[in-house]
Image: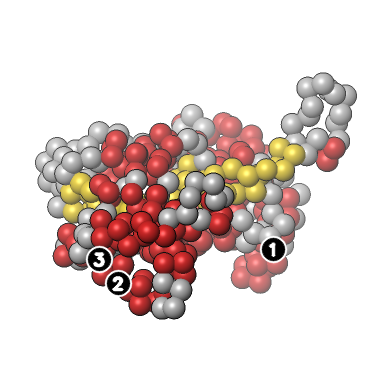
Amino acid sequence: MPLQRAITDFGADVPFGQVPKKLLEHHGISVPISSAQGITQTHAQTILDTQTMDTEIPIGAAVAVLITQMDGSMIPIVDTTPDAEKPEQIDRRTTRKLGWKEARLGFTRSPQQILPIFGSTFGGVEEAGAQLLHSAIRAGLGVDTFVHGVGDGAPWIAMQMEVHFGKPGRFLLDFYHLCDYLADASRVCAPNDPKAWMEQQKSRLKLNHFRAVLKALEPFREPDCVADPQAPVRAAYRYLHNRPQHLDYKATIAAELPIGSGEIESAHRYIIQIRLKRSGSWWTVKNAEAMLALRVLRANQDWDAYWLNSDLAAFSISPVRKEFESNLKAIFCCDISTGSNEFE
């Protein structure tokens, strides 16, 4: 499957319309856009359909400390399902509905690891938590592993980390997200020197003196009659006051562990957004889920293993083999079992 592999590799990175040009440039082969799209989506769907999830935390040898982070990105989605009240509609352009759906991405790694293990889903928060647990098990999670989680203030992130890791472990509120709230408040609390005020609050937080920060905010809190967009001090006070159990920056710094979630925010850009959130692109939910599975497989360094398994005899008796072949027969002009690379 060398040609399919090359096409899928390009299709995972660039819009399908650009794949034929790249294939011609690098391999001297010309294919229609529809073939490039069909082959890429067929392999992406196979990757999604054959995913397995580890749910049992191993007993025995494990890494001592793991770092885990999780966040979400909104992806543009198109739905062309015909209107139930107008079944005669066959032009899907007339039934198109545009919207957004959250793709959740998490990772786990040890402090010594450079490349994390990722998990992703377009499903709900429980599915996101299960994906995070799976990535932690792959990264070496054991029953005695200390799991250091970092994230923004979204309640679902802290909840899922607590559900799956709990003690021994710790969830930390992203220091820099908190500082964004305080920066907005600083212009009200210290209009003459907001920078000095901010530095003071940062120092207090890093020493776990968050109550001193609350005390500094208290005199400037806007009354409830003021709308939230015009009440930055109240927003900062509430954000800090509601999360006292997630503010142990002192111990985290001493352990040389991250206090920000910039790593997962960066991963959202280079795994999800660079392909699924391009200007003018809209995805069906099915194709978006499959493309995300493909991109995560590559980020997890499982790319070679997937193609090795695709070439093995074991793949011929896989339960997805028949469906896989029927999908590709619509793209290839011959039976793919012959190994021919001719296209219609």
Q: Position of residue 318 (x, y in %)?
A: 46, 32
Whether residue 11 appears in this view of the structure is no
Identify the image quadrant of residue 211: bottom left
Q: Residue tagged by mark 2? A: 200
Residue 111, percent from left and from top = 23, 61
Residue at the disc numbered 1: 18
- The residue mark sitting in front, 3 or 1, is 3
Circle 2/circle 3 CB separation < 8 Å: yes
Report the amino acid beneath label 1: Gln
Q: Which structural element holds mark 2?
A: helix
Q: Amino acid at mark 3?
A: Arg
Relative to 205, say whether 326 is above or below: above
The secondary structure type at the circle numbered 1 is helix
Q: Observer-nearest residue: 185 or 330?
A: 185
Residue at 61% of width from left, 70% of height from top? 26
Q: Residues within 10 Å of mark 1 (few under 14, many from 20)?
A: some
Question: Is 263 in front, or is 295?
Answer: 263
State the SS at label 3.
helix
- State the separation of the CA atoms marked 3 and 1: 52 Å
Ranked by sequence position, the earlier of labels 2 and 1 is 1
- Left or right, 338 with respect to 16, comes to left
| Residue picked out by circle 3 | 204
Q: In 3D space, how far apart are the residues under numbered discs 2 and 3 (Cα atoms)?
A: 6 Å
Residue at screen point 49% across, 46% down: 224
Whether residue 59 is visible to the viewer of this picture, yes or no, is yes
Mark closer to the observer (2, 1): 2
Residue 18 picture quarter: bottom right
